[in-house]
């Protein structure tokens, strides 16, 4: 299998899960400014939307959308810790967070990256995001991970999206429980491996 990714993009989430599960998957970097792969191939020929992540299966089929890719990888590995068994309430808790991150956080960051939005608009969107993170910070007051005691695919997605705050001047440093949580995630060996592979932290 192959994972098409771009450093720090939402493809970091399945990259983390690949490392967490010790999967043997080829990583193909995509330059999203030119939509070409490292070998110079036109990425639009692989994914007509031009977006990452994309998982290419051994039979040539492809899967897109980070949350779906991570579900597929976890189920294929039969890992009930990072993705609870089908039909359990624990799995629905993971789905709750996956959907919240997608609808309330992921797309809310888009205006902050968009140069066509003026500073006043960006301030408004930052304020909206901060209210959501205030709520999450309170939730994390009593939680080790998003769904309680186990690291799941929802945590890899939330960590990935929240990491974007570092690139758009969204200050979350005052949210103590959130910061403690982010450190717990960042300290995981799988996360460190993915971050280093993408050049997001120095290799030692």
Image: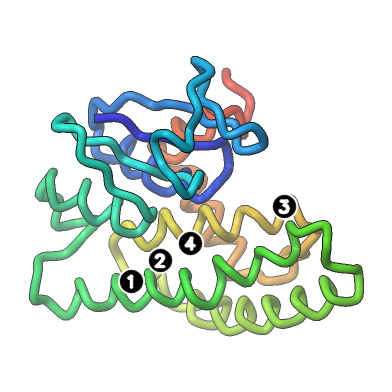
Q: Which residue is mark 3?
A: 166
Helix, strand or loop at label 1? It is loop
Q: Which residue is mark 2?
A: 144
Disc 1 from disc 4: Cα separation:
14 Å
Disc 3 from disc 2: Cα separation:
22 Å
Residue 18: % across, % down: 31, 38
Helix, strand or loop at label 4? It is helix
Dots 4, 3 in contact, CB < 8 A = no
Q: Is residue 137 left or right of residue 184?
A: right
- Residue at position x 72%, y 67% from top? 111
Depicted 150 relative to depicted 12: above or below: below
Dots 1, 3 in contact, CB < 8 A = no
- Residue at position x 54%, y 37% from top? 6
Of labels 2 and 4, earlier in sequence is: 2
Residue 21 makes an appearance in the image: yes
Q: Quadrant of the N terminus?
A: top left
Q: Which residue is mark 4?
A: 158
Helix, strand or loop at label 2? It is loop
Disc 4 from disc 3: Cα separation:
14 Å
- Residue at position x 20%, y 33% from top? 60
Q: Which residue is mark 1?
A: 148
């Amino acid at each position: 299998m192959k994972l098409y990714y771009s450093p720090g993009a939402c493809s970091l989430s399945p990259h983390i899960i690949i490392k967490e599960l010790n999967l043997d998957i080829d990583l193909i970097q995509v330059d999203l400014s030119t939509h070409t792969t490292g070998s110079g191939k036109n990425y639009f020929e692989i994914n007509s939307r031009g977006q990452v992540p994309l998982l290419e299966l051994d039979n040539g089929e492809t899967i897109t959308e980070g949350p779906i890719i991570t579900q597929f990888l976890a189920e294929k590995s039969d890992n009930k810790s990072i993705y609870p068994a089908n039909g359990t309430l624990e799995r629905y808790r993971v789905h709750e967070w996956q959907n919240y991150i997608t609808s309330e956080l992921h797309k809310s960051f888009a205006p902050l990256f968009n140069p066509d939005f003026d500073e006043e608009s960006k301030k408004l969107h930052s304020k909206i995001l901060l209210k959501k993170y205030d709520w999450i910070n309170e939730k994390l007051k009593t939680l080790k991970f998003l769904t309680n005691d186990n690291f799941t695919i929802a945590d890899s997605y939330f960590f990935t999206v929240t990491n974007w705050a570092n690139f758009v001047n969204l200050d979350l440093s005052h949210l103590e429980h959130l910061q403690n949580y982010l450190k717990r995630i960042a300290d995981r060996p799988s996360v460190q491996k993915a971050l280093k592979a993408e050049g997001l932290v120095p290799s030692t």
